[in-house]
């Protein structure tokens, strides 16, 4: 049982530290250049997974919109990190999980489970309590980051819709490219 727990803790540690690293990286690059370089490195690194050309061609109809949604998500997150703290950015980005059921209702026409709706109802006041009280008020960086969360939630639903129809490697490489 220690393996899965250690794995989850490792992922959380890596995910959390990326916000600090990106904030530091913005000292040397503009947000959009930074995102472009990230996507370029990701595309190059994932190119070792390249499937046959026919699979890439078949996946383009899905991977182009997926890539746009992903790029808008990362761009808005990085723009937000210019003026908000890494901790606030991480928390607000995490709201994407609560937004997935809303996107699923709109796009997949699926009924949301009661627990998902209750989670959303708890998340929204929690978001307000953790970002508004005290000396720091809701800022433009927080708004950019909330836009990021909305696009990341949309990305999850679109991958759920198109992922089973296409080769996973083809989707990955072509949307990053």
Image (cartoon, helix red, strand yellow):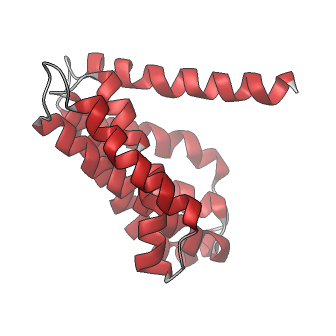
Residue 102 in which image quadrant: bottom left
* Nearer to the camera, 96 or 53: 96
Q: Residue at x 29, y 33 (%)?
A: 129
Residue 30: x %, y % from top left: 17, 31
Q: Which quarter of the image is occupied by the N terminus?
A: top right
Classify 148 as above or below 112. above
Q: Is residue 54 left or right of residue 147?
A: right
Classify 102 as above or below 109. above
Residue 154 in which image quadrant: bottom left
* Nearer to the camera, 95 or 48: 95
Residue 66 in which image quadrant: bottom left
Q: Which quarter of the image is occupied by the C terminus?
A: bottom left
* Nearer to the camera, 50 or 14: 14
Residue 79: x %, y % from top left: 19, 37
Q: Does residue 176 appear anywhere in the picture?
A: no
* Nearer to the camera, 96 or 163: 96
Q: Residue at x 41, y 58 (%)?
A: 99
Residue 39: x %, y % from top left: 39, 43
Tally the numbered discs: 0
Q: Residue at x 76, y 26 (%)?
A: 5
Residue 168: x %, y % from top left: 65, 61
* Residue furthest bottom in the image: 109
Q: Is residue 102 left or right of residue 1?
A: left
Q: Does residue 96 appear anywhere in the picture?
A: yes
Q: Residue at x 65, y 22 (%)?
A: 10
């Amino acid at each position: 049982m220690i393996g899965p727990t250690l794995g989850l803790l490792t992922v959380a540690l890596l995910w959390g530290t990326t916000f600090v690293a990106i904030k530091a990286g913005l000292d040397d690059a503009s947000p959009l250049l930074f995102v472009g370089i990230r996507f370029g490195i990701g595309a190059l690194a994932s190119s070792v997974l390249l499937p046959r050309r026919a699979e890439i061609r078949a996946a383009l109809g899905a991977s182009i919109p997926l890539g746009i949604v992903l790029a808008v998500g990362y761009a808005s997150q990085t723009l937000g990190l210019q003026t908000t703290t890494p901790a606030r950015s991480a928390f607000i980005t995490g709201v994407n999980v609560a937004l997935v059921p809303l996107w699923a209702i709109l796009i997949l026409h699926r009924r949301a489970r009661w627990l998902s709706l209750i989670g959303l109802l708890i998340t929204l006041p929690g978001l307000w309590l953790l970002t508004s009280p005290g000396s720091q008020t809701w800022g433009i960086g927080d708004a950019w980051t909330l836009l990021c969360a909305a696009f990341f939630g949309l990305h999850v639903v679109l991958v759920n819709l198109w992922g089973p129809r296409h080769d996973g490697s083809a989707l990955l490489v072509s949307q990053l490219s």
